[in-house]
Amino acid sequence: MEMKTITQIAEEIGVSRQAVYNKIKKEPLSSTLQSFMSKVDSTLHFDINGEKLIKSAFEKEHLSSITVNDVDSTVKLLITTLQDQVTTLTTQNEDLRQQLSEERTDNREQLQKKDVYIKELTEKITDLTERLAVLFENSQQLQKNQQLLEVQNIIYDDVETENKKGFFKKIFKKSK
């Protein structure tokens, strides 16, 4: 396990060796460090847990030295930063609302155009359906007329054939 001296810890923290020595001699840190240190050749060595305790003692001292002015200026800076962010987000929100409104308007216009187009197509389909029905009726009438014409032609041919027979053949016709 790696052990560090007061000098090494002081260099890492950025304070003098004497400041570290004075800090570890004060209670309650002094008694707490007893289980995390050893003396080798009249030099104190601390294990990782002891090193952490010493460093945390200096961090607490650093935090307590922050003044009310420092806190006040930091709070003001944070408030200003947050206000700027709120303003930026509000602007972005308004821009997005405007964009959404424009898109909705465009979509409504497109739907109206499509409705008109569908109405026109429906009218064309209705017209074509009516025309097709008329054509179908005309086709059926033509078929009937054609059948009648064929029947008339048959009758006409029969009459013609009868007319071509002589007068006496009609009178003296043999009955079968």
Image (spheres, rainbow, N blue to C red):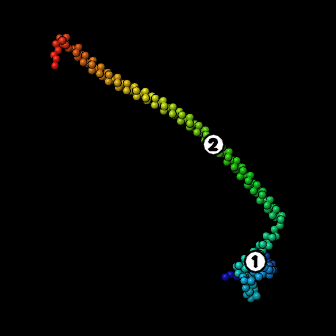
- Residue at the spot x=38%, y=27% of the render? 139
Q: Residues within 10 Å of mark 1 (few under 14, many from 20)?
A: many
State yes or no: discs 1 and 2 in contact (Cβ < 8 Å): no
- Rendered view: 107 above or below 133: below
Report whether 159 appears left or right of 133.
left
For mark 2, what is the residue? 104
Q: Quadrant of residue 15?
A: bottom right
**Residue 79: which disc?**
none
- Residue at the spot x=78%, y=72% of the render? 60
* Percent position of residue 66, x then y: 81, 68
* Percent position of residue 91, x then y: 72, 49
- Rendered view: 101 above or below 61: above
Report whether 74 appears left or right of 100.
right
- Rendered view: 167 above or below 135: above
* Percent position of residue 155, x then y: 27, 19
**Residue 54: which disc?**
1
Label 1 vs 2, first from the N-terminus: 1
Report whether 154 appears left or right of 132.
left
Q: Nearer the viewer, residue 62 or 171?
A: 171
